[in-house]
């Protein structure tokens, strides 16, 4: 593979990475815990966009349980966002025709 071709591919990759970052920002995933009693919605960069707690959990003695459910719901949503990001990255990388096993610095 010649150097100019590699530079062209690197430029294409950079452009696609910019597009990917824009697409990632638009990804949204909702996770839940406690059979739907707590739900959270995260953006593609892990930002918490929404939190919904069933009113039945607002009792003082349930605070610790509520906290644990929020953490579990956040983890569920974040896992879904990470999976979607990996799929988008694989789609993008597949079209470049780079040699197998070539690792990029980003």
Image (tube, grey):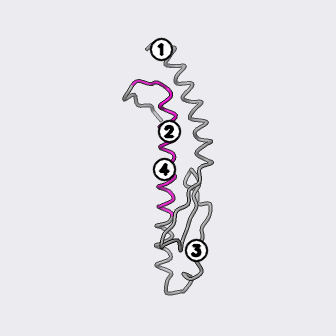
Which residue is under mark 3? 53
Residue at position x 54%, y 81% from top?
A: 57
Does residue 103 show up magenta in the picture?
no
Q: Alpha-carbon distance for marks 2 and 3? A: 33 Å
Specify whether 75 is left or right of 45. left
Q: Alpha-carbon distance for marks 1 and 3? A: 56 Å
Does residue 93 show up magenta in the picture?
yes
User: Which of disc 4 and disc 2 is earlier in sequence?
Assistant: 4
Q: Look at discs 1 and 3 and give the one toward the viewer.
A: 3
Q: Are marks 3 and 4 in contact (CB under 8 Å)?
A: no
Which residue is under mark 2? 89
SS for dot 3: strand
Q: Which class describes the residues within 10 Å of circle 4: few (<14), some (14-19), or many (20+)?
A: some
Residue at position x 48%, y 32% from top?
A: 93
Which residue is under mark 4? 82
Highlighted range, magenta: 74-99
Q: Which class describes the residues within 10 Å of circle 2: few (<14), some (14-19), or many (20+)?
A: some
Considering only vertical position in the picture, is 6 above or below 94? above
Provide residue 88's location: percent of width, then percent of height: 52, 41
Which residue is under mark 1? 3
């Amino acid at each position: 593979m010649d150097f100019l071709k590699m530079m062209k591919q690197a430029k294409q990759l950079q452009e696609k990475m910019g597009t990917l970052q824009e697409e990632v920002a638009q990804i949204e995933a909702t996770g839940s815990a406690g059979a739907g009693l707590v739900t959270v919605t995260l953006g593609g960069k892990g930002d918490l966009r929404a939190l919904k707690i069933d009113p039945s959990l607002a009792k003082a003695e349930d605070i610790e349980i509520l906290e644990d459910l929020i953490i579990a719901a956040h983890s569920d949503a974040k896992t879904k966002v990470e999976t979607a990001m990996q799929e988008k990255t694989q789609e993008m990388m597949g079209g470049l025709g780079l040699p197998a096993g070539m690792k990029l610095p980003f």
